[in-house]
Image: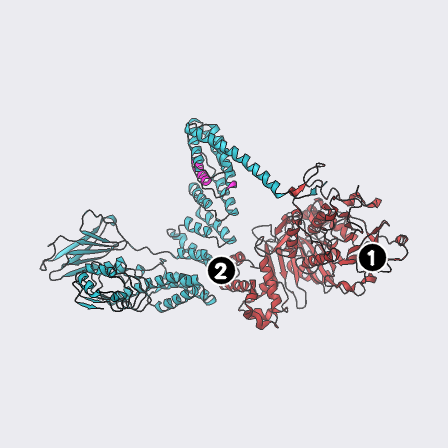
Chain colours: A cyan, B red
Amino acid sequence: MHGRVKLKSTAQQEEEKRKEREKKLKIYVTARDAVFAKRKNGMLDDEALLLTQQLLSSNPDVATLWNYRREILLHLETIREEVDVQKMYEDELSFLESCLKVNPKSYGSWHHRGWVSARLPRPDWTRELGLCDRCLSLDDRNFHCWDYRRMVVKMSGVPVDQELQFTDRLIGSNFSNYSSWHYRNACVPFNNMKPLGVILAFSEYELVQNAFFTDPNDQSAWFYYRWLLGRAEREEMISCVFVSREEERVAVAFSRPVNVSTATTTFVILWPLVICELPPGTISDITNEHNLTVHWTEKHTHRDCALYTGRSVSWCRDSATDQELFSELSVEKTSVLQSELQSCNQLLELEPQNKWCLLTIILLMRALDPLGYERETLSHFQTLKEVDPMRGAYYGDLCSKFMIENTILKMEYAEVRVFSLSDKNLTTLCHLDQLLLVTHINLSSNQLLRLPPQFAMLQCLEVLEADNNAIENLEGLYHLPKLEDVSLKNNKLSRLSDLQPLASCPKLTRLDLRRNPVTQLVNIESELAELLPSVTDLLL
Amino acid sequence: VLHVDRRSYYAGNWASFTFNGLLSWIEEYKQAGPSDEAAQEKVEEGEEALALSSLDTSITNVEVFCYARYRGNTDPGEGHLSHPKMSACETEANAHLCCCDYSQLMYSRGSLVDLLIKSNVSRYAEFKNVTRILTYRNGKVEQVPCSRADVFGSKQLTVVEKRMLMKFLTFCLDFEQHPEEYQDFSVHSFWDFLLTKKLTENLRHFILHSIAMVTPDVCTVEGLRATQHFLRCLGRYGNTPFLFPLYGLGEIPQCFCRMCAVFGGIYCLRQSVRCLVLDKESGKCKAVIDSNGQRISCSHFVVEDGYIGLDQRKNVDSRQISRAVLITDRSILPSDSEQQISLVTVPPVEPGSPVVRMVELCSSTMTCMPGTYLVHLTCSSSGSAREDLAPVVSRLFCIPVSPGEESKEEEGSEVPSVLWALYFNMRDTSAVDRSSYDLPSNVHVCTSPDAALGSDHAIKLAEAVFRQLLPEEEFCPPAPNPEDIIYDGEGPQGEGPGFEEADPAEALPSQGEVESAERQEEAEDAGETGDVAKQETVAVAENEPRPASEE
């Protein structure tokens, strides 16, 4: 017997639903108030457990309730036999499973599960791993579950290759899921796995190549690839010590920014550079020889520097010719990088417009031979900016960085203190800590907008040429003790206050400001004369 | 809607059978119904009778081979099979083996799936995704990488091939947007087009035979469109574009029958229509006379091609399909999982031989016993089914030397052995124009399964016939959900006793009385939901589509 087809009126349905909701809300609110009252009175009993369970099973995202539950469980743990404790926590786990069904991405539920699993006297990790498998097969991007899985794997000592196989399976079914790739780098210690490492790394490259050849526009594989190729970590060291007799100061450059206690006022910190003003008269006598040692106690390292008789300056540094200084990639074997470059070039032939491929090629080329591949790198950057204009500025900055690195390398090879990088589309300045000893710098005809504060690290700078840029800010030209000649023709300096930092450079005598808006200001000449009295050669 | 069927099962040539059902079908297909003169009595003045064929001639060349040893006599219908896997088939009464459903698979974005969803008929069936596409190439069965995940995971393709394949498939997905890529090839064949696409030989094979599934000589645009259709079906329900209904495609016509019955359609199995009663003046069919001599008035008559007598089909030029059904002992390409549903495309094994499409079903499809596989082979006929298909079977399977002789299973041999085989030809009238039949205009002819994968032609035909019957009505409108139905307080809640219980096959034939399969109070709904094309015969009652036994 079948009924008649008659659709209920929507108003009728709405009304029914509304009543249903009201009823539910009333029950919920009553239970909530009861729970809060109990907690206030410090009642840690089974009834509270039951009430919180009712509430949490309809809304598993109330952190307070989970906290209360933990208080109760901890209390019950102290008054119960181990067998009962085991039972209590097992019940808790099955309750949690029902909560995860309500909301598989509930922070509270997952956190509580981790807590319970850790407290369980006799944990069943196989079951927990099975739970993770199930959850991840339903949603392979559930990061709560991935986190929980990591905990389970760690606690139960699941072998690495078993976890690798697990991600193999997930990647096989959906290689665009970065979670699966990421889990590999979280669980696989590729870097410190020597015997297995080489073979594993080889199949790892193969796997990831399969992914980016299949779909080169999918970023998951590229990101993992980038991780696989490694990221160079610079050795922590004192890279340069520079002593100037005249200024009675020592400048120390570190390989990374350092914290220096500023208890004494004699330190000026410019991030990776520390300038130490020596007490007056310490090294001023030119007939004396001085041996200085800088200690980096934190790293148990030091560097010596001798200031000989008759010399006004002295420095001690490692040559920066070492390519790895700037390498983004750390894979030791050049042959691996070489074959990876070949694969990527093969892909580029098929997909000349692919930005991920282009970018990876650039990185590989830099790791292999930054100067040798300079021309190709530049042309790839050009293509990148065309195919991915949305990230044009990023590519511009990255290209600037590489150009600066190349120029530093060339400068080191030539053993000169002149840094010239004009007409290279520079958009930003970096690695300025490497330019501590530079006396002449030419940045003309680029696209620079400012001379950043780090520019003040150029302690030996005498001549600066930065014509034909779009500079509107000079905050980096600050306390440069040797700076004499500054040329800023055709820039965007428009206010007198923009030139204020120059007043801190004691030796500035020549300043060229032609074709800057600031020259149009009334009384500019007299104002400048007042601001920069040392400048004798002013071009407006 | 009155639905009469001379068979004891639903869906005619679309049906699926249990193994025993199949054995009886083999026996039955050649038996003619009793011829009938008595029908003439019911024909009145101004009318004439037009007899329907009492013998279904749509199935021919049936040949059965059993390679498992019999314990008793050698008759395949009665013998006991000694092969453990085969005897399991026999003893397990509910072992479903689908047989006659020609286009065993459904495109996941095909018109059949769309219709099942739209009409809510899908609620009566369950489906599984075909898990892999295979092909036969250079004497080996290989998996065809067709989805993104397949291409990624494929071990047979180099990374460059992976890129080339993905690039080509991505292009096909919206090839209309890039006319510059193919317009120069509009007069050339798809194969010529593929040759210019920098694809390696195996990629061309995969695309042509397993993805586009066309012959090399089709035009470029047709090949591209076929590829596009395949790709668009990917990923909707799984990694291949195909679905398989559990228990066989024969379930699908039954689902439509069920929906029809729920809304008042009346079903009579084992009851045939002997002849049509034509009005001499108008030349239209005004009634039918059934096998019990009962005259039933109708305004339209829908009939399957197999019922139409020779006289009326003189001008009909139909094609034939060759079919084979095998039971084998292992998968054609063993993998980690035993439960694979595979579509295998077999290009011509020799020049001039047909392209064969093969479907291998595992036990989880509920079509065969665990440990066995059910294999369907299909191609357009050039000779008898056995002549067409045996060469492929012998290449892909191990056939025991003589019936009764069990194959010697060599250790490590990967080739599956055939335990049982059935060959037959089936008439394909899908390309026949209605006007070639010499029949009254209110008699509508529908076809047996056609040669294409998917059931697009049948759906299109069903809708076309429906439009002629009821031009004002919507075709297969969504059926209401059970919770939207208000019950009058009588009888149990829910769907109540189902279709099976009211099965007219049991309820009715001998008395010749027509009983309501499902009572339907709102009579106007009744005419809307019948799926006409799939049913063997559907007569639309003359006055109103109200069940005859209305109390």
The amino acid on which the numbered mark 1 sits, given as a three-letter code, is Cys
Q: Is residue A468 magenta?
A: no
Q: Residues within 10 Å of mark 1 (few under 14, many from 20)?
A: many
Residue A105 covered by magenta stretch: yes
In 3D space, how far apart are the residues under numbered discs 1 and 2 (Cα atoms)?
61 Å
Q: Return the residue found at the far front.
A: A522
Residue A463: x and y in percent read: 21, 66
Question: Quick check: B367 above or below B165?
Answer: above
Chain of the residue on which disc 1 is drawn: B
Instruction: Report the residue at 39% width, 57% height from top.
Output: A229
Taking the image as drawn, is residue A340 in sight? no
Q: Residue at x 74, y 43 (%)?
A: B521
Q: Quadrant of residue A304?
A: bottom left
Horizontal arrangement in the rendering, residue A176 relative to residue A523 (left or right):
right
Residue B533: x and y, percent?
A: 73, 55
Question: What secondary structure do most residues of the magenta stretch adopt?
Answer: helix
Marks 1 & 2 on one chain: no
Amino acid type indicated by mark 2? Asp
Q: In the visual, does B332 lie left or right of B164?
A: right
State how many labels appear.
2
- Which residue does the numbered mark 1 point to in the structure image? B285
Q: Which residues are magenta?
A: A102-121
Residue at left offset 48%, top offset 34%: A92
Parent chain of label 2: A
Checking the image for residue A215, the label placed there is 2
